[in-house]
Amino acid sequence: MAGPAKARQRPGLQGPYPSVSFSILKSLHASTYSIHVAAIIRMLSPRLVRSHHWFPTMAARGACAVLVLIFLLFVLISHTSNKSISSDSVVETRERMSNGLDEEGQGDAPVETNKNAGISDDTVSSLLERIKVLEDELSSMRTRMDDAENREGNNGIPDEMAVPLPTTKSFPSVRYRNEETRKRVLITGGAGFVGSHLVDKLMLDGHEIIALDNYFTGRKKNIEHWIGHPNFEMVHHDVVNPYFVEVDQIYHLASPASPPHYMYNPVKTIKTNTLGTINMLGLAKRVKATVLLASTSEVYGDPEVHPQPETYWGHVNTIGPRACYDEGKRVAESLMVAYNKQENVKIRIARIFNTFGPRMHMNDGRVVSNFIIQALQDKPITIYGNGTQTRSFQYVTDLVDGLIALMNSNYSLPVNIGNPEEHTIGEFATIIRDLVPGSTSEIVNQESQQDDPQQRRPDIRRAAEQIQWRPQVLMKDGLLKTIEYFRAEIDRNKRGGKPPPEPVRHGGLESRR
Ligand SMILES: O=C(O)[C@H]1O[C@H](OP(=O)(O)OP(=O)(O)OC[C@H]2O[C@@H](n3ccc(=O)[nH]c3=O)[C@H](O)[C@@H]2O)[C@H](O)[C@@H](O)[C@@H]1O
């Protein structure tokens, strides 16, 4: 059974076995715990092989062998007294028993070695059970690891749940600009109706855009075609809180503009227009940016001067339902002028008149979206009041051109941006119904809105003189495009199983109290 004294080759070992190892093996073989000892010797042997030249004399080798023997006996005694068997040695023991190998791997050791070793059958069977449990655990871990490796391509998400990522996204081609002419532009309310059209125009013109939005009325969908473009960044942020960034220009559009939306949370509307404007002016002051405020024709209130020039001071009810927006914008204009005078901030003030176009929200609640949605669905077109009140409507691309022209001018006083083509709301209802082929909507009158301005039309001479801007799109052409947009939206909603859109009335959104 014992191995021959001469060196022999063993799998996994390089070079001959030193004789000292074999003497130790021989003497230990007869011992009660031969299996364990042999395992330890096997672990040590390669080291001994490698360090063979450290044993120059037989005496030294002998002394060393004795020391090793004492150490091994000590290990054996502590093993026995603990009566615990490590899983490694158990596995090894089991291998030996099942393979019938002797300590030197010759395969001639009888299985009865267990009995010789004094291990009872009970111990053996409990060891075998334990080994079985460990093997099962190991195999389930292997399976889990294999699964995880297979899922690596999906970032660990199971195949059935993984959504394939688009490999490349194509963007509209944008103009190339060098460092000198390319501007870094911040647009607050950048995911909103007007903001998103402004993003488009400036992106196509090769500028770097940071669009800020709190998504109260803005939607990611409006700017999703730019997400991932190196010149574009979308930031979810509320302007009521300060925001710090290095930019050359700030278009400050953030605020709900539709009456049902700005009346929904009047306190928040006031905060957005006051604190939000202070934050943007503070930023403009720090980074020396030019800031443009999207003000409104509502600063004229229910005007007594018609059409409205910028020199008209307005007629606003400070405690009416529209005051949160009207007065919020009036304070915002005052803040702009104060920062200009006191801090030399470069300012632009655009007074925006009624604007319409694609990307208006289905629930916007303003007259254009309401009338078009009603006409497309053959529902009654609802006029608030007797319909004699007037408005002048501009298409959104004209507004965007006006905003950019104003920003790039040197003009610091307010400028009206609107289309002077004026209609009564009654006329407007008929115009829209006639533009929707086959619409059978009836036109009905409903209760009038409190403080609803009775006439509105911009005087745009200042815009023409100072920024060389005039609207280009005929109201009818703009309406046709907008009708197509809403038709597609309604179809998309239908396909998605959503209920048909209901136009929102002023105060129709449950207001917060
Ligand atoms: O569209 C805009 O740009 C402007 O819209 C609103 O001003 P408002 O003129 O009251 O806008 P609408 O809600 O569209 O109302 C226009 C007129 O149509 C009437 N209307 C509205 C909705 C409707 O279903 N039926 C209806 O007769 C209103 O009573 C009002 O007389 C905002 O207050 C302005 O800040 C914003 O600049």
Image (cartoon, helix red, strand yellow):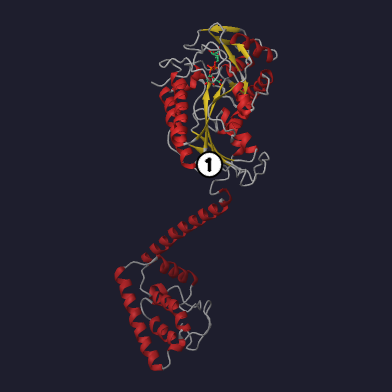
Residue 380 in view (yes/no): no
Residue 68 at x, y = what percent?
36, 83
Mark 1 — residue?
A: 247
Cβ at disc 1 under 8 Å from ligand 1: no
Answer left or right for 25 relative to 201.
left
Could you tell me which residue is drawn at 42 percent across and 63 percent down? 128
Residue 479 in view (yes/no): yes
Give the answer, above or below, for where 157 lies relative to 359: below
Answer left or right for 474 relative to 193.
right
Residue 404 at x, y = what percent?
60, 32
Residue 159 at x, y = what percent?
58, 45
The answer to which quarter of the image holds residue 177 is top right
Q: Residues within 10 Å of mark 1 (few under 14, many from 20)?
A: some
Could you tell me which residue is drawn at 48 percent across and 18 percent down? 313
The quadrant where ligand 1 appears is top right
Residue 473 at x, y = what percent?
68, 23
Could you tell me which residue is drawn at 47 percent across and 29 percent down? 337
Amino acid type, callout 1: Val
Could you tell me which residue is drawn at 60 percent across and 15 percent down? 371
Give the answer, above or below, for where 72 lies relative to 340: below
Q: Element type at marker 1? A: loop
The answer to which quarter of the image holds residue 374 is top right
User: In front here: 389 or 345?
Assistant: 345
